Amino acid sequence: MTTNSHYFFAIPLPSEIKKRLYEKQQKLKEQKSIAYHNWTNFEDFHITLTFLGHMNEEVKEKLIKSIEELRLAPFELSIGKLGWFGLNSRPRVLWIGVEKSPSLRMLQKQIANIAEQNGFKQDRRAYLPHITLAKKWHTGKIEEKQLEQFQTMISEQWMVKVDHFVLYKINPNLTPRYQIVSKFKL
């Protein structure tokens, strides 16, 4: 059976970190100057490693077998600083930053290489690990000074132990949107 579902590899976050992110997200939602169409669901918080796009079952099984051969050690990451993509006055994505550790970069690079060897085009932009809180700016503008205040209000450092990653399937019409298809231990 062929599907056109989209997939990506990511690091899922533990419940306690998701809870903290959700609390920070709620503080931001209370701000009248922040206007987003989409706020990430509590269950969907993650750190993307590489986006794949659509694939059929045969390709998916082959990719999973290739990824299962990876042998890397567990590691820890620091997360916590608020950031954004886009214009300061209308940031299209609001996120929490993730430390660019050598272990994370190695994991991401190896997964991206395996994906490319299996026919998936990879983004040529530099990898910027983050956890999306909100996206699709709605209306109006925000003052840069307010964003800086939010950084102070929201930023807090947390450590995340990474001992596995997953292959997610995107279900755009469901909540939560991301379904674990396969789990890979480090």
Image (tube, rainbow, N blue to C red):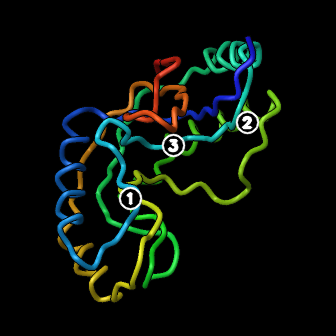
**Which residue matches tag 1?**
134
Secondary structure category for the residue under label 1 = strand
Q: Nearer the viewer, residue 173 or 50?
A: 173
Instruction: State the residue at coordinates (44%, 60%).
Output: 135
**Residue 30 found in image quarter:** bottom left
Q: Quadrant of the N terminus?
A: top right
Residue 177, given in percent of the width and then of the height, sits at 44, 35
Choose the circle earlier in sequence order: 1 or 3.
3
**Above or below, 32 relative to 76:** below
- The amino acid at mark 3 is Thr
- The amino acid at mark 1 is Ala
Residue 29, given in percent of the width and then of the height, sits at 23, 64
**Which residue matches tag 2?**
113
- The amino acid at mark 2 is Asn
Instruction: State the residue at coordinates (63%, 41%).
Output: 51
Q: Nearer the viewer, residue 109 or 153?
A: 153
Instruction: State the residue at coordinates (46%, 18%).
Output: 185
**Which residue matches tag 3?**
48
**Residue 110 found in image quarter:** top right
Choose the circle earlier in sequence order: 3 or 2.
3
Residue 34, given in percent of the width and then of the height, sits at 30, 73
